[in-house]
Image: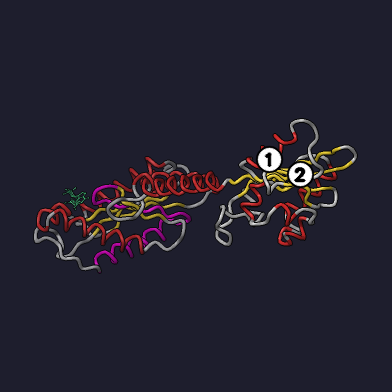
Amino acid sequence: MQENTIVTPPAAGSHAHLSGRVLGLANLGLMVLDANGRVVMWNQWLASHSGLSAHRVQGCELFELFPELRGQRLEQAVQSAMQSKLPQQLSPALNRSPFPLYPTGTWGGERVEQAVSVTPFTEGKERFCLIEVSDISTTVGRERQLRGQAEALRAQSYVDGLTGIANRRHFDVALDRELRRAQRNNGQLSLLLMDIDSFKAYNDHFGHQQGDACLTLVAEAFAGMLQRPADLAARYGGEEFAAVLPDTGPEQAALHAEAIRARIAALAITHAPAATRPHVTMSIGVATYDKNTLNDAATMLAAADSCLYAAKHAGRDCVIVHRPTENAA
Ligand SMILES: Nc1nc2c(ncn2[C@@H]2O[C@H](COP(=O)(O)OP(=O)(O)OP(=O)(O)O)[C@@H](O)[C@H]2O)c(=O)[nH]1
């Protein structure tokens, strides 16, 4: 038997020595409490992870030894195991590190993350309770890392690489979600489609790199105009942007669109000589959900796009709003 493992009462039979060796070698914490909650077994793993030798803890009441465990889930688990005679598991999600156990030789740092199970048993007429503690730090760390990577990947796949605002995929998901919400609640929902005017001329004159910088400036200014948490500003593709505006009717959407148009013009980004305006401007088409006519993503997008087209034909740098009743008539 390892020096630091106690087993009381001593194991009987010809394999007592072997059992002691196994307890000493086990790669998890094993302790046994008697019916009064006193430690009668404390294996080597526990000694080396707690800094408390088996001789130090033998006969001590567990919750006096670790007062911080009083009133906690572990104490309840021990009590119910003893009373119900049924094994209990402590959920690692709720009780990450109940015991002050540390990686060997590093007391005072981060506790090891623990999975704890409590198993009652009887020996002769005496009742005992076996507590097993496994170190799940590596598994939990790996899970955390994987979750972090998955979140980062998801964020990347929802963000436009150039401008940092939502991408087309994010826009599609948000429009679909908000449409279903509007249909359920008979609510309002508007959509803006916007396009930088004469952007080909900008690129041709200033070069593609400066074109990219211009797109980023416009995206930042546009996204900054949407204040509500559920609003979504997205790059729809190329020099086109889009906004999903939940709980927004046509009049409010038109005001928003006009404010965005004015904000972009106010950036006063010098445009190419061939452009229709001396500074960069945007044309905007607006469509609002209507349960009879504009009730799916494709028809809403088509309506906003035809308004955007009309805005281009009306001379650019303007907003055109789709009127469901007029257009349906
Ligand atoms: N720099 C840069 N240019 C882009 C990007 N995506 C699309 N473009 C350019 O945007 C321009 C769009 O041109 P057009 O569709 O002809 O429209 P326009 O010149 O903006 O004219 P109107 O829309 O009619 O006002 C093209 O020259 C594209 O190359 C991008 O990511 N970066």
Q: Quadrant of residue 283?
A: bottom left
Q: Tell me the residue that label 2 is attached to.
A: 7
Mark 2 and mark 1 in contact? Answer it, CB < 8 Å: yes
Name of the residue lying farthest toward the top: 14
Circle 1: element type: helix
Left or right: 244, with 17 as reference point: left
Label 1 amino acid?
Answer: Leu
**Residue 39 tag number:** none
- Which is nearer the eye, 8 or 236? 8
Q: Quadrant of residue 303?
A: top left
Label 2 amino acid?
Answer: Val
Q: Is mark 1 within 8 Å of ligand 1?
A: no
Residue at x-position 41% and y-position 51%: 288
Residue 110 x %, y %: 55, 58
Stretch of the chain drawn in magenta: 237-266
Check disc 2: other Cα within 10 Å, few if <14, some if 14-19, many if 20+: some
Residue 323 seen in this snapshot: no
